[in-house]
Image (cartoon, grey):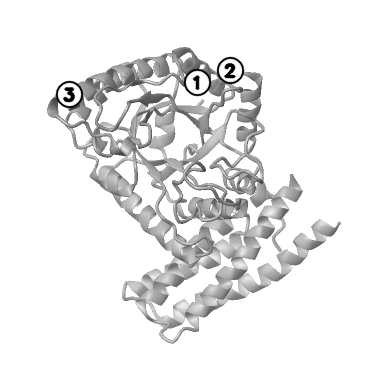
Amino acid sequence: MLLLAAALGRAEAQRLDGFNVIATPDHPFGSASAERALVAAKRLGATTVAIIPFLWQANVSSADIRRGNDMPDDALRQAIRQARKLKFSVIVKPHVWVPDSWAGAVQPKSEQSWVTWFSHYRGELERIARIAAEEGADGLSIGTELAKTTQRPEWNEIIAATRAAFPRTLFYVAHNVEEAEAVPFWPLLDAIGVSLYPQLGADHDKIGRLAVMIAVTERLETLSNRIGKPVVVAEIGLRSAKGAAAKPWESAEERETSVDPELQAEVLADWIAVLDRPAIRGILIWRWFTDPAAGGRHDTDFTVQGKPAEDVLLCAWTAACRRSHLER
Amino acid sequence: MPDRLAAVRGGFLRRVSHDADALFECWSAKEPKSLAVLTRIKDISHGLAGAAGIFGYPHLGNAAATVEEAVTVRLSGAGTRREVERSLERLLTGLGMSCFHQIEHVRRRADA
């Protein structure tokens, strides 16, 4: 399999397109059903999966960050092995979970708390990095959307320690283009990672959302040129629900609304079209479940499974539409 | 699989007809040379160029890319209004032809 570093380093190399994959309780990584779900992703043309071990802290100012119990070491190993067996490029992308809040709000209150937080974080990341290295993962994110931490100097040491544990591609995932432009440690990494959930306006306002998408993409290109590193859109998506374009980050738990699978398909098609620039080397959709029966036309979650967005991805990631010779 | 692809391509063409309306509206606007209108045309063409490639319509994609390029040049202070106009006419003609033929084609496939 082409190493991620090689894929990121050469313009003509394989792109890193695929999904952030989440295991559901009845379909753990390694199970036959998870394999069916991953094979379905592969059929759409996905080449890459991001596997997400969660770290946890009780509140945003807590210094006590630790590994969550959703994906113990064995489960992480199993996930990487199963994905590699199916010939996916594998990215390990730890997320920090904070009850009733989110990773971007993490901000220990005192200097001592910062030191403790980084010490714990580094310990957990190094452990994950060693497993990722031993199991042959292709890439590792040193963090995801930790916007209020990225100006801290501790990251330099964390990156050095992680490099010692993980010999392949390292990156960080910024919360948005604004954070990406402010991250000081890109030169120490191999790629610029970013999540993209900007407000896209009213559902029907295609021209308005195109303008937002183009502006974001141009800023990412400028950043990529300035830093000299490729960009991977490590998280992008929206629910298949009415009103989702206005707040693409909003989860089903945050707002109950009716389904709109066509909106999800159209917005993803627009994003993929606009992000088709040399600086952007991959797009990882949020999200895909290990449950092969997840999603469906009546579901309002982010997953694209069983929805029209699957067909958009099939066209974008394979030559299926270009081969179909329907054009007159 | 071919039915799925026909459906998704049909969906693209339906959306394209809205793009065509929006482009026509832009070009028929009172101030067709204004920065806002030209930027709008550029944004629509950019999205269309990318999407047409994804869904397997390279001619449309090329025509849209030509409009985007012409507007970019015009916005930089070079180029002429006529060049933008010509590229836009070609794209709008292509969109009309493509939409008409393809929607008919998709319908025939669905009926078959």
Q: Are marks 2 and 1 on the same chain?
A: yes
State yes or no: discs 2 and 1 in contact (Cβ < 8 Å).
no
Report how far apart the C-alphas of labels 2 and 1 lie in the structure. Answer: 9 Å
Q: Earlier in the sequence, mark 1 or mark 3?
A: 1
Give the residue pinned by disc 3.
A115
Q: Please state the horizontal and vertical placement of residue A83, each as a whole percent of the image.
A: 55, 24
* Amino acid bearing label 1: Ile
Give the residue pinned by disc 1.
A80
Tag 3's secondary structure? Answer: helix
Q: Are marks 2 and 3 on the same chain?
A: yes
The residue depicted at 43 percent of the width and 82 percent of the height is: B32
Report how far apart the C-alphas of labels 2 and 3 lie in the structure. Answer: 37 Å
Report how far apart the C-alphas of labels 1 and 3 lie in the structure. Answer: 31 Å
**Image quadrant where one finds the N terminus of chain B:** top right
Q: Please state the horizontal and vertical placement of residue A55, each as a whole percent of the image.
A: 37, 24
Give the residue pinned by disc 2.
A30
Front disc: 1 or 3: 3
Q: Please state the horizontal and vertical placement of residue A316, each as a whole percent of the image.
A: 57, 47
The residue depicted at 34 percent of the width and 19 percent of the height is: A166
Query: Circle 3: is it few (<14), some (14-19), or many (20+) Cα within 10 Å?
Result: some
Which label is found at residue A234?
none
Q: Please state the horizontal and vertical placement of residue A49, each as a whole percent of the image.
A: 51, 31
Of residue A307 and residue B58, the one placed in the foreground of this image is A307
